[in-house]
Image (cartoon, rainbow, N blue to C red):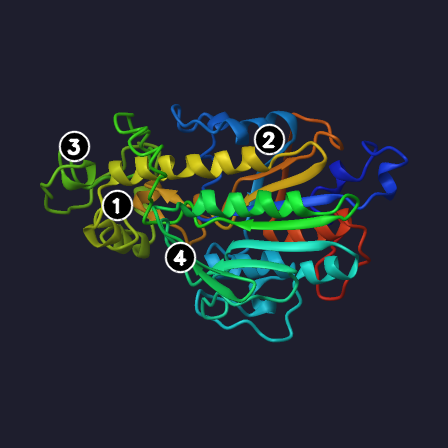
Amino acid sequence: MKQLLAVFLLGSFFTASQAQEKLNVVFILTDDHRHDAMGFTGRIPWLETPYMDKMAKEGVWVKNATVTTALCSPSRASILTGQYAHTHTVVDNFSPLPPNLRFFPEYLQKAGYQTGFFGKWHMGHQGDQPQKGFHHWESFTGQGVYFNPRLNINGERIQYKDSTYITDLLTDHTVEWIRKQKKGQPFFAYISHKGVHDEFMPAPRHRGRYANQPIPYPSTINLTAKPGSKIFGDTTLLPLAHRAATDPAYNVKDIPSWVWAQRNSWHGVDFMYNGRVWFDEFYRRYCETLLAVDESIGRIMHKNTILIYMGDNGFLMGEHGLIDKRNMYEESQKVPLLVYAPAHIKGGQILDAVIQNIDIAPTVLDIARVEKPSGILFCPY
């Protein structure tokens, strides 16, 4: 697909003077944020995401955004390269990065942009070392931690203490870096949050916010235990025996055998994360952890900056009796994708076209007016 949202960003919304500008771009990536876990969608009635709502109201909501591979590392590599996993070869969370891969921020550097990376890298054996394409670098090893992280900042490792919360820290550093950019100097900031990856840990100010809220169970959750069992938050775990779906229209007969097997495993609601957490607690903590991410958006939003917000993959929350991602179900592959640029685009737009993670690289390069590089997909749309 051609230049993901260039139809909005580079069309008639530009004035003659703007058409010659090199525009500032901020790309925010979140981990495991499912496509409908945003307040304005209404999927979770009590979820509060005022800044995501603002992006949708005053910008563009890509309703059918998907990823080509619903897993952290392959998706992130596709975002950075504009390539499918079979091309960039980062096919799982442990594959090394080929040395010849080109990341789209490298082309931005050549075009005169200052570039900064803040957060989770999670590719190439999960190192935190600075990567090509970024003038400024801040990252951590592997999945990182929610509290008291150790960041590699431009090659120097700094340990943070005193209950420092990673989402807030990355936001602080991004805002500070943007503030230091010289007037007239175009910049690109890539913020890659740890949130909302399991184990979900909300910021202290958000902990318990949704403790008593009812869970909107999906109709295909196919619970094999009754209310009062461990999955609902009790210590009693009833014997597991598959029964008909709660949704009478759900075709239980044709459910693949691997789905039945995963229901009673790390990936399923019957024995989720090997019994480490209960579904209701899992659901509420996920939503509470997302609140700091939404606040991060609010702190970075600026009318003269193009802000793109996206998730690295979807996330099942009980659909088909499963949790997590890494399968071909819609909930696993669909992601949130919002664009906010009130100085350049008309707000309140909903895009129904299927847009993918491989479209991010050509879109940002198109915004920066970089000539088509070889290896990055620029397909006609």
User: Which residue is rendered at x = 77% and y = 43% of the image?
Assistant: 183
Secondary structure beneath dot 2 equals helix
- The answer to whether the residue labelled 3 contacts the one labelled 1, judged by CB atoms less than 8 Å apart, is no
Give whichever of discs 3 and 2 has the lower sequence position. 2
Q: Residue 269: which disc?
A: 1
C-alpha gap between disc 1 and disc 2: 33 Å
Give whichever of discs 3 and 1 has the lower sequence position. 3
Secondary structure beneath dot 1 equals loop
Instruction: Identify residue for label 4.
Output: 144
| Residue 56: % across, % down | 59, 29
Instruction: Identify residue for label 3.
Output: 227
Q: Nearer the viewer, residue 61 or 331?
A: 61
Viewer-nearest of labels 3 and 4? Answer: 4
| Residue 100: % across, % down | 65, 75
Give whichever of discs 4 and 2 has the lower sequence position. 2
Q: Residues within 10 Å of mark 2 (few under 14, many from 20)?
A: many
